[in-house]
Image: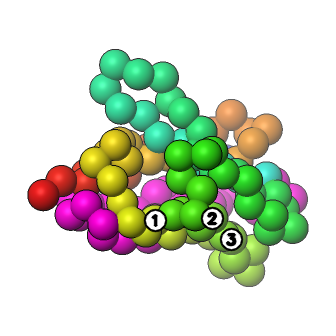
Amino acid sequence: QVQLVESGGGLVQPGGSLRLSCAASGVVFSRYSMGWHRRTPGKERDIVATITPGGRGIYVDSVKGRFTISRDNAKNTMYLEMNNLKPEDTAVYSCTAYGTNVWGQGTQVTVSS
């Protein structure tokens, strides 16, 4: 059974940084493209960044230059390094392994002074 568990969210001031983690189990992690998505109340879940099995990251324009997606296949873990955070980055961030239809429970990121 595939399980994904996010961690690392919290409250941070504008301009601050956070590092999110997504730990996977029950799946051959290294074979899957992975992704981070985020959702705010009343809105659809939007893609933030994806990463190929080989480690190539793809980003939406709003986070380019500020966020970095990475993965450690030996640890079955994906990361999202978020710098220069803005209030509009406030959301619940979730991870997924594409093709499994499995999502983690999400971790709340709040950017506020």
User: Dot 1, how many residues are within 10 Å of its Cα: few (below 14), some (14-19), or many (20+)?
Assistant: many
Residue located farthest toward the left when viewing the structure as drawn: 113
From the top left corner, tell me how far across and down residue 75 is, in percent.
66, 78
Q: Secondary structure at mark 2?
A: strand
The amino acid sitting under disc 1 is Met
From the top left corner, tell me how far across and down residue 100 is, in percent.
74, 39
Is 98 left, or right, of 69 in this rendering?
right
The amino acid sitting under disc 2 is Ile
Is 112 left, or right, of 16 in this rendering?
left
Whether pointer 2 and pointer 3 mark residues with C-beta atoms closer than 8 Å, the reply is yes
At 66% from the left and 70% from the top, the residue drawn is: 70
Which is nearer the eye, 28 or 69?
69
Q: Which residue is mark 3?
A: 71
The first of marks 3 and 1 along the sequence is 3
Q: According to the image, what is the colour scheme of the structure?
A: rainbow
The amino acid sitting under disc 3 is Arg
Q: Secondary structure at mark 3?
A: strand
At 49% from the left and 56% from the top, the residue drawn is: 5
**Is 8 located above or below residue 27 in the figure?**
below
The answer to whether residue 27 is seen in the rendering is: no
The answer to whether residue 38 is seen in the rendering is: yes
From the top left corner, tell me how far across and down residue 73 is, in percent.
75, 74
**Is 75 located above or below residue 90 in the figure?**
below
Does the magenta segment cover residue 16?
A: yes
From the top left corner, tell me how far across and down residue 101 is, in percent.
68, 34
Image depth: mark 3 or mark 1 in front = 1
Quadrant for the C terminus, please.
bottom left
Is 14 left, or right, of 64 in this rendering?
left
Q: Which residue is mark 2?
A: 69
Give the number of the disc on residue 82: 1
Residue extent of the magenta highlight? 3-32
